[in-house]
Image: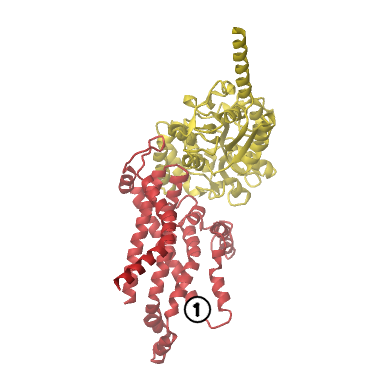
Amino acid sequence: MADDRRSRVGLAAALSLPATAAISLGFLLPVLWLARMSFNPVDSSGALGQGWTAHQYVELATGPFYAELTLASLKMAVSATFFALLVGYPIALFLHRLESRWKTVLVLLAICPLLVSGVVRAYGWIVILGDAGWINSMLRGIGLIDRPVRLVNNHVGVTIGLTESLLPYMTLSLLAGLGRLDRGLEEAARTLGASPLRTFLRVTLPLSLPAVVLGSTLCLMLAISAFVTPRLLGGGRVFLLATEIYEQALVTLNWPLAAALAVAMLALFSLVLVISGRLQRRVAE
Amino acid sequence: MLVRTAVVIAALALSTSVAQAQPSGEITVMAYAGIFQDKYTEAVIKPFMQKFPQVKVNYFTAGNSAQMLGTLRTQRSSPQVDVAILDVSVSNVGNKEGVFSRLDPARVPSLRELHPMAIVPDGFGPAVTFDHWVLVYDAEKVKPAPTGLADLWDPRFKGQIGLSAMPNIQGIAATVLASKIAGEDHKTSIDGAMKRLKDLSPSIQTFDPQPDGYTLILGNTLTVASGWNARAQLYHDESKQRLGVVFPKEGSVFQINTINLVAGIKNPEAATAFIEYALGREAQKRFTEAMFYAPTNAKADISAAAMNRTAAAPENMAKMIPLDWGWVTTIRDSWNNRWRREVIAGR
């Protein structure tokens, strides 16, 4: 019996070996390399040295700018996730309830923005939201404004762009989670005299909470690490962890600081995952 | 016997000098992509290969200067690139890290003909192109044309300005010019520059024009932006003069590309021959006339028409503000933070 179990464990280990090797080579090694890079020294001329120093982490912990960056990244990620949830929830609920042969087509439509590159979509938003874009032209046309409102090249533009880029992920996660929502429970609530709003608040919403937590976690992670949208729509006014990593790595060439920021971001991800895991368990109970 | 030995030595010496004069093999030159690649290939690389038929030159691109140095850093043990053309602020870092080697002045005689500002300390790769900070504007919409950075405070430009901020090196040039407007020496203080740029901040549409200021002006998003002369001149021609280019009345700052010999390469002879060719009068003339980078070889005989569109025109040269890019690296972080806090966030 024990022998049997041992051989099964051995077989499992042997079977998982290729995957373990692939993950180690493709993911763990680069992350370890990154962690090692974050301890390299950089001299005042910007030259990368050899050796060990914790200078970058001291800089991160003591420089007020990095605390602001982290907070700004979190704020941006939370607001974009919130708006994506606000827009994505009704879409997912509608698609979930739809009983039509067009359902598959509509689901595909909801996620088709993923087929277009993020860069192209960001340029699309620049055209729509710009001073001469159609939103400003429309507002001017109906006489609401006489000077263009700045909707891009600032935080507003980045929030709009990020929300749109998160929407397909949010809709898909919600749709997957809503699968366990039993239509019969809603009908029972209505039969027992609950108003549609009450049914939604007391039955539909609580039952869909696990899906909400799942979708929000995924979107938060994507939003914190989003780089293209803030870079293209931020107009140099939006400073986030991801854009800072880019600048340190590819403009000012401070690889150790970029690596330390990346490690800090990884820590932030872990924190989000832990919190989301707890929430997930609580809403499931 | 003695005569025979002397003949053998002479023959050997001759053969080595012939070998030196006739480099061969394959080398890879790394420089910018896009229009730079097209023009540089036509103006310098092809003529070099015609002159030295035994050398094949490959052109390799890896993004901006910092990305190029990043590529070289990862290839330290076996370099795949022999010659790199990149921004001086980045090549300085490469020189300190030992990514590049010093040039042998005996094999690069053109070094003696270079402009004094083109020389990099300690014998490392010198400047191969000079570019300078300019204002570009929509010549159809903006009348009269702006004359310098100081004009941007004019309310007629409100909301239509693209000014590349730091850490982009255009932001460094803008700081130096704003300091000059404020009547201060940027080496001792940029307080006046920061205050003035902060006042300008609400008028600025973007501090990071994407993909660049020239395109945004021609696409009707901006009417005025900061830029670099060489590309601005090309867009000026391409847009049939719609994109106007202004050498600022305050003066300007050089952007310098250096040409560098990568350390530890297999074929330094051919690579050095290429560097010598690129710095020579002939290549400098052709590339300036093709792309309006000012020549770094002071003896290059540039046509007057091309010369007047570069910083090398005497009236422009007199207005250039000297800027030590090696020194800039040491203050870049503090200037960058001040831009973010004082200019962009307006605190």
Q: Name the residue type under label 1.
A: Phe
Q: Quadrant of residue B248?
A: top right
Q: Place residue B191 in its image quadrant.
A: top left
Number of numbered markers? 1
Q: Nearer the viewer, residue B111 or B293?
A: B111
Looking at the image, can residue A278 be seen? Answer: yes
Q: Position of residue A265 (x, y in %)?
A: 38, 54
Q: Tell me where residue A34 appears, x and y as whole percent.
A: 39, 49
> Looking at the image, which is closer to me, A229 or A263?
A263
Question: In which chain is the residue bearing label 1?
Answer: A
Image coordinates for residue B204, horizontal then vertical, percent:
51, 48
Q: Which residue is mark 1?
A: A94
Seen as rendered, the residue at the extreme top is B2
Q: Residues within 10 Å of mark 1 (few under 14, many from 20)?
A: few
Q: Is residue A280 above or below residue B86?
A: below
Chain letter for the red colouring in the rendering = A
Using the image, determine if residue A28 lies above or below residue A109. Answer: above
Residue sitting at 58 percent across and 29 percent down?
B275
User: Looking at the image, can residue B244 be seen?
Assistant: no
Chain letter, yellow in picture? B
- Looking at the rendered structure, the secondary structure element under dot 1 is helix
Q: Quadrant of the N terminus of chain B?
A: top right
Residue B242, horizontal then vertical, whole percent: 67, 44
In this view of the protein, which residue sits in the foreground, A90 or B74? B74
**Residue shown at 58%/32% (left/top)?**
B129
Q: In the image, is B76 to the left or to the right of B212?
A: left
Q: How are the residues colored?
A: by chain
B66 w.r.t. A229: above or below: above
